[in-house]
Amino acid sequence: MVAEVINGKDLSMELKSEMKKEVHDLRNKNVVPHLTVVLVGNNPASESYVNGKKRASEEVGISSEIIKLEDTVTEKELLKVIDRLNRNDKVHGILVQLPLPNHIHVQHIIEFIDPKKDVDGFHPYNIGKMMTGQDTFLPCTPYGILTMLRSKNITIEGKHAVIIGRSNIVGKPVGQLLLNENATVTYCHSKTKNLKEITRLADILVVAVGKPNVIDKHYVKDGVIVIDVGINRLDDGSLTGDVDFDSCLEKASYITPVPRGVGPMTITMLLHNTIKAAKGMVQ
Ligand code: GUN
């Protein structure tokens, strides 16, 4: 079997052209969707992600701004910036780029963002809504993965989904979203024993480890659907995922590439959430 590649870049372009129309309609009603991104410090990867978010916003007509703060900013000062954004009616979405410097408590910051503007879907209130299957902002990478599966009409119900990784941003919520779709979900992580025995049982394998080529054809069964969340920069400057793409291609039924896979979908779902916020759909 040779897998069908799920191209996240192409799917993103399709979704963005629909969003462009939605934003146009909102602007005609004098609602200008606005996203504010807060970037603390000068981590080059974060800077590049944040610039990508701004560029994509502009593509669909969402107004956006980046607030850059020194990495010496105190937690109190950062909370003050968020307070101002929470109270500004023109700001529909607030995103504080992670990671933050160690002296700032990430959870204090996330919990201070107005849940109605939490377009990352990271606030515990929104996580609770997601867990109980209520409509809210879904975290962008997991939501992007779900959208990729749906775009190929892949049945999730009854499938065994194995997630490698248990971060709050990707691993945990993607498992929850697939559970909401009636998959049977297994979480694996750095302390998991016999990883290969478990991954070989997966109908859907989501790999969010952050290390290149940890999964190859020996870890998967025939017909598996492989979702590669990793974005690793190699010494030669090229990008690669967590999955050995060429090796798994011959066994999988579907596979996502890196680049042009999950990455573009993450940003696209952020735009989707910002439009949802501008419509006042999350209370
Ligand atoms: N850092 C890496 N991914 C993300 C994300 O999806 N949102 C935020 N806020 N920070 C991140």
Image: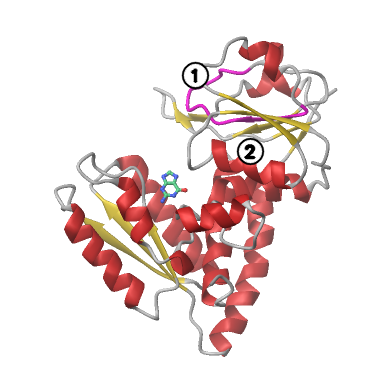
Characterize the local packing of mark 1: few (<14), some (14-19) or many (20 or more) Cα atoms within 10 angstroms. few
Residue 130: quarter of image: bottom right
Q: Quadrant of the N terminus?
A: top right
Q: Secondary structure at mark 1?
A: loop
Residue kind at label 2, given as amino acid type? Gly
Residue 81: quarter of image: bottom left
Q: Is the residue at mark 1 in contact range of ligand 1, meaning its CB lies under 8 Å from it?
A: no
Residue 14 appears at what percent x and percent y?
69, 59
Q: Give the residue displayed 23% in from the left and 46% down from the top.
A: 104
> Looking at the image, how many numbered discs can be counted on the residues?
2
Tell me if residue 175 can be seen: yes
Residue of label 1: 190
Residue 19 on the magenta segment: no
Q: In the image, which residues are magenta?
A: 203-215
Residue 208 on the magenta segment: yes
Against 73, residue 250 (above or below) is above
